[in-house]
Image: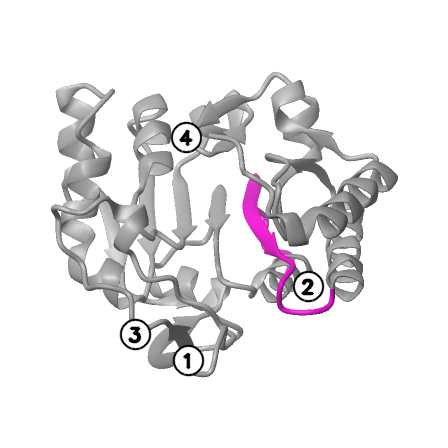
Amino acid sequence: MADRIKPHLVKKVARIRKWEADMKLQEAKDIAFIKYHNYYAPENVVKDSKNVLTFGVGGECKFEKLILHENTRLNIHMFDPTPFTCKNIGWIKYKSASRNINDSVRNKFLSTKIKYSPIGYGPSNSTLNFYYDPKKEPFTQRRIIKNYMQSFSLIKTHENCESVSVPVNNLRGIMDNLALKKVDIVKADIEGMWPEMCNEIVDNKIDIKMLATEFELIFDDLETALGKATKAIEKFTNFGYTPVINRRREKLMLEMLFIRKDIYAG
């Protein structure tokens, strides 16, 4: 379903479209990529991969389901420290796996092959405060997820926000804890921590095939945020990756793919 742009964001979204044009970024739907729920990827990336880390489960894990359907050899590790996901991960996995896959893949999806850990991404092994609206109704399985799931943020959206302290770790620390020397695919919806993850991957030369991530542009003024996005794209390009827009959104965010150039070209 396409985004509906909010009237007060029209000018800012137009500025983002101009920035995308100035950066000469291709959109994934215009390339021969495969769509796995909300994210695109080259087919060979999914078929030739083994280890996948995804950050930010929220209320569904359909991307994970679909890539497992494509490649049943995948080892997928999901991370989300928010109370909603911690409490309801079993139900979330069951609902995400209930359609469009065969029994064998469904069983693997619901088994321990798809692992979940209640931690988030951060710059170090520590804790962060996530803010939320306490007026949101608590979870019940009778409600539609998007209507009741609390939204967590690293910033206070209003004075009445409450906070919860959650455990976090960086990518290298998580890989070490899992005894993984190599990761092929990383998907990250990490509430504004994208500059830290991008810097960690490039600065520490963590060799992955593809990063799929959201650049939230709400934590700074728009020009500052777009400047950070430009630097991240330049760093990844110099590191040997091709940047691609996953989907153009009608809100203050970018969905980005960074694909290793030798794989992208292949």
Rounded to the nearest angstrom, the CA distance separating label 3 from label 2 is 38 Å
Q: What element carries label 1?
A: strand
Query: Which label is found at residue 129?
Result: 1
At x 71%, y 47%, the residue is 10
Quick check: 205 above or below 25? below
Q: Is residue 36 visible?
A: yes
> Which mark's residue is nearer the viewer, 1 or 3?
3
* Segment colored magenta: 204-221
Q: Identify the mark nearer the N-term, 4 or 1.
A: 4
Say if mark 1 contacts mark 3, CB within 8 Å. Answer: no
Q: What residue type is labelled 1?
A: Asn
Is the C-beta separation of discs 4 and 3 under 8 Å? no
* Residue pointed to by mark 3: 134
Q: Nearer the viewer, residue 194 or 182?
A: 194
Badge 2 crowding class, 10 Å Cα cut-off, few under 14, some 14 to 19, many 20 or more, is few
Q: Spatial distance from mark 4 to mark 3, Cα to Cα?
A: 30 Å
Which residue, given by chain and number where applicable, does mark 2 sit on? 203
Residue 145 in magenta? no
* Sooner in the amino-acid sequence: mark 2 or mark 4: 4
